[in-house]
Amino acid sequence: MALGTLDSLRVRAESCTACGLAATRTKVVFGVGGTSSGLLVVGEGPGREEDLRGEPFVGRSGQLLDRLVEEELGLTRASFYIANVVKCRPPGNRDPSPGEVASCSGFLDAQVELVDPRVVVTLGNVATRVLLGTDQGISTLRGQVHSWRGRRLVPTFHPAYALRGGGAVVAMMRADLVRAKQALAKAPS
Ligand code: SF4
């Protein structure tokens, strides 16, 4: 996929029909945020509210994510970028299929090149498994900093899981975000 700019890539995504999710989406959820911090956050796919608004992580789990990133890294969406593995909502919030992930991977790959993050934080099983190319679960993969495409990758739980799991899960997310902050500080800008 030719790189272009984030804006031109967004325009291409908004008319994409490369997989079956195009038929059921309301809006394509391309990604938002700034690129100055060197941080990219990657989730699995849009939920109901995101599908309606065309923006990732806008519901309760997004509010929790924003609060934790601001408190642990001192960053707002004006300075970090957030996107999903698939840009259209899987019906019923099911996991995206391997075929849908493969169809959409060119967009995320291009976003990674254009955002050029020093640190990537993956949220939950799907995003972490897709990016690291593993079948291992998030509970095994989190708690460490992985090398990924010459960058640092820090897996953590999906904030929707943290909303259900309560304080213990939120505490582990905070610890992961501190790891991301330390990785950002160590990585050359
Ligand atoms: Fe295209 Fe990705 Fe949407 Fe599928 S999920 S239609 S590949 S933008």
Image (spheres, rainbow, N blue to C red):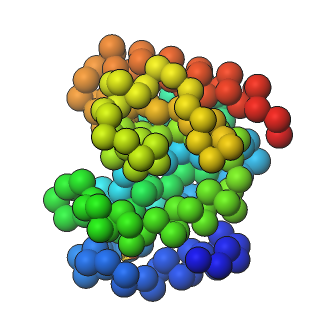
Rendered image quadrant of residue 102:
bottom left
Asked whether, in this view, residue 88 is left or right of residue 92, the answer is right
In the depicted view, which residue is nearer to us: 17 or 149?
149
From the viewer's perspective, is residue 55 above or below residue 40?
A: below
Q: Quadrant of ligand 1?
A: bottom left
In the displayed image of the protein, which residue is found farthest to the right?
A: 189
Looking at the picture, how far across and down is residue 172, in whole percent?
42, 18
Looking at the picture, how far across and down is residue 183, in whole percent?
68, 27
Rendered image quadrant of residue 115:
bottom right
Is residue 42 something one can see in this rendering?
Answer: yes
In the displayed image of the protein, which residue is found farthest to the left?
A: 92
What residue appears at the point 36 percent right and 56 percent down from the top-left corner? 45
From the viewer's perspective, is residue 7 above or below residue 48?
A: below
In the depicted view, which residue is nearer to us: 64 or 113?
113
Is residue 57 something one can see in this rendering?
Answer: no
From the viewer's perspective, is residue 53 above or below residue 140?
A: below
Please state, as top left, top right, bottom left or bottom right, where the C terminus lies in the image. Answer: top right
What residue appears at the point 62 percent right and 57 percent down from the top-left corner? 112
Asked whether, in this view, residue 132 is left or right of residue 113, the answer is left
Q: Total number of numbered labels?
A: 0
Please state, as top left, top right, bottom left or bottom right, where the N terminus lies in the image. Answer: bottom right
In the displayed image of the protein, which residue is found farthest to the front?
A: 134
Looking at the picture, how far across and down is residue 43, in whole percent?
42, 48
From the viewer's perspective, is residue 53 above or below residue 74?
A: below
What residue appears at the point 37 percent right and 42 percent down from the top-left corner? 134
Looking at the picture, how far across and down is residue 145, in whole percent?
56, 27
What residue appears at the point 67 percent right and 60 percent down from the top-left corner? 113
